[in-house]
Amino acid sequence: AYRTDEGQPWVLPVVKKVEQMIANDNSLNHEYLPILGLPEFRANASRIALGDDSPAIKENRIGSVQSLGGTGALRIGAEFLRRWYNGNNNTATPVYVSSPTWENHNSVFMDAGFKDIRTYHYWDAAKRGLDLQGLLNDMEHAPESSIFVLHACAHNPTGTDPTPEQWKQIAAVMKRRCLFPFFDSAYQGFASGSLDKDAWAVRYFVSEGFELFCAQSFSKNFGLYNERVGNLTVVGKDADNVQRVLSQMEKIVRTTWSNPPSQGARIVATTLSSPQLFDEWYGNVKTMADRVLLMRSELRSRLEALGTPGTWNHITDQIGMFSFTGLNPKQVEYMIKEKHIYLMASGRINMCGLTTKNLDYVAKSIHEAVTKIQ
Amino acid sequence: SSWWSHVEMGPPDPILGVTEAYKRDTNSKKMNLGVGAYRDDNGKPYVLNCVRKAEAMIASKKMDKEYLPIGGLADFTRASAELALGENSEAFKSGRYVTVQGISGTGSLRIGANFLQRFFKASRDVYLPKPSWGNHTPIFRDAGMQLQAYRYYDPKTCSLDFSGAMDDISKIPEKSIILLHACAHNPTGVDPRQEQWKELAATVKKRNLLVYFDMAYQGFASGDINRDAWAVRYFIDQGINIVLSQSFAKNMGLYGERAGAFTVICSDADEAKRVESQLKILIRPMYSNPPVNGARIASLILNTPDLRKEWLTEVKGMADRIISMRTQLVSNLKKEGSSRNWQHITDQIGMFCFTGLKPEQVERLIKEFSVYMTKDGRISVAGVTSGNVGYLAHAIHQVTK
């Protein structure tokens, strides 16, 4: 979760404002939402992902399912795919997740009933970047119709995203091999500070004519973690197909949670549908993104100033909340035990944990770990 | 071509269909008796005062939005367990239970169903009463279980077919799962009396069945939270380690906030810890962790003495209005000159009433009187008000005389 420069959680000012509006609105009650969710939320959420001028929206071939966070959106999508994709109830369809990936991806697809979950090459530890050739190679050799879980931006846990040129190559292979794109978009806006930039890949795939799913989370970019605000955007060939897909997703939702929680959806819908509140929100998002970007550049420059062995441009090349530092398990252990800096054994750090006050200490500690431990 | 060409259109929801048709009707006297939510005597949704107060308190506290634990808000789950089991419950005091927050009743049922599918190896069979809530079957099916049934409702008497139920239940293969509605059976409104519950418990114990209680109306049925939880507590007292799903949608009017809980009564606290760890492993790939708002409201109400007192009064108020509408409907039917026995309307309890009306009669009610209900003759008494009960009685009499 995001932290301020004081190391505190941050409720976005626009969220506080909108919550007060909701609290003061006596016309609101706690009645059930429709099964697929709050209509104003669904439409606005998908519009954010696909863009105001999205051809798919204009052609009325998109659908939305309000879900319990990004996880819930992934699960509904996975349950639908297991029932209806590549045949009926074809649990053998391979599902590919990146190596590494958010560990819950595996569980989501497994619990949805998929039996064959594989990895595709992604992180190149040697060069501390994207293993594009490995990735493309895996796609070339994946069985047709395989499902690929793609991180829309701010890859978790590596922070390493394909460039637009690389995304074009990925899309070309996927189109030729008839592979299904399932985007996980948990950081739109939060990654670069620009909603459009962070949604470039999803929108490119749409413009290339793909049918796809995009699981969206508003946990980070709205700071609404515990309200469980998510959306599954469905892009299809035409309205008729999308309508049938949504009717079946409705059945899945009905046996999972019946209908989604209203508080978070109301906050997001109110914010996104008001030009003024939207601008305020955008400003709040940029505040978070900019702080993380600042911490990245400050950490990198300190490491380079210290002359820490190795290259450190990956700290600023990477994007989003997480960074794969390249520290090995022994170095990580040193950081934890000797310096009381907590990070994952993979060397992943949460950039949000950095503050102007601890930057020097963290940089020095990394320097020590790298020079003392091999 | 599309990946989805072969995807069939899902069937329309029967209950939603009722509301859709009602909305389109221009008759000023129209009544929506399909609605599964409480309405006040003006036919309006009712936000409880204790809920408004709790919301104001929460707003003033300026709390953060950090993720809840996977198992939910601890103050909420503990209070939910205590509400169901009773503060003097040995199972509660000894800690030999685990309660996780669920997405209202549906989500809690689904967590339980998934848990049983994964860890109850003795059987795949879940026995539901005939009839049961329409969503029970697809929930258990999607979790990978098989559905069976036991006799429950007697359409001839519009009441409980107790001998039929006992007969069927006594023949259920050992170690099967049996689902029981704790109170205010949905859709019939027919509940066993306490002596009948005692016999059911004995039989269920003898057959060594796993008991799954669905309690969606505690407090809302009789107006008394302890009375409505009597069966749940009796079974536990008899040494039956039940599993339980709770909803706060109706009794706190928190429908859209999705506040619910799933409980497993265990042999001891250690088993409870192990069960909890597995429940979390099930929840994480479903939605990671639950929504906070409804749980915070419910928790504040249950744990703040003044609010809790106010809640008990308000929930009794809702239950009393429903009971009063039942009484008025029967007396109005008599006044209309109906000679039929309508005692079941007041014998039944909770939000719903199985009127005993046949599909043709229901169709006439819809077409000729704009009175909307589901084809099975189920009405939501919550949709009846002192302003329209006379009209309803008139309409029912016209189609049944």
Image (tube, coloured by chain):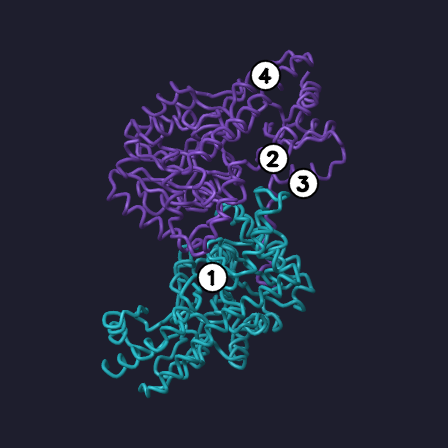
Chain colours: A cyan, B purple
Crowd class of label 4 (few under 14; some 14 to 19; many from 20; radius 10 Å): some
- Mark 1 to mark 3: distance in Å? 42 Å
Chain at numbered mark 4: B
Q: Quadrant of the C terminus of chain A?
A: bottom left
Q: Secondary structure at mark 2?
A: loop
Q: Say what amino acid the circle numbered 2 marks.
A: Val
**Are the residues under marks 4 and 1 on the same chain?**
no
Q: Say what amino acid the circle numbered 1 marks.
A: Trp
Q: Secondary structure at mark 4?
A: loop
Residue under the image location 49 percent in, 69 percent down: A288
Q: Which residue is label 4 attached to? A: B342
Q: Please indicate whether residue A368 sits to the left or right of residue A188 in the image.
A: left
- Mark 4 to mark 3: distance in Å? 29 Å
Q: Position of residue A139 (x, y in %)?
A: 46, 74
- Mark 1 to mark 2: distance in Å? 40 Å
- Residue A23 vertical position relative to residue B164 in the rendered view, above or below: below
Q: Secondary structure at mark 1?
A: loop
**Are the residues under marks 4 and 3 on the same chain?**
yes
Crowd class of label 2 (few under 14; some 14 to 19; many from 20; radius 10 Å): many
Q: Quadrant of residue B179?
A: top left
**Are the residues under marks 2 and 3 on the same chain?**
yes
Q: Which residue is label 2 attached to? A: B35
First in sequence: mark 2 or mark 3? 3
Q: Say what amino acid the circle numbered 3 marks.
A: Glu
Crowd class of label 3 (few under 14; some 14 to 19; many from 20; radius 10 Å): few
First in sequence: mark 4 or mark 3? 3
Q: Which residue is label 3 attached to? A: B20
Q: Depth-wise, is mark 1 or mark 3 nearer the camera?
A: 1
Contact check, label 1 and label 2, Cβ < 8 Å: no
Q: Position of residue B344 (x, y in %)?
A: 55, 18
- Residue A164 vertical position relative to residue B37 in the rendered view, above or below: below
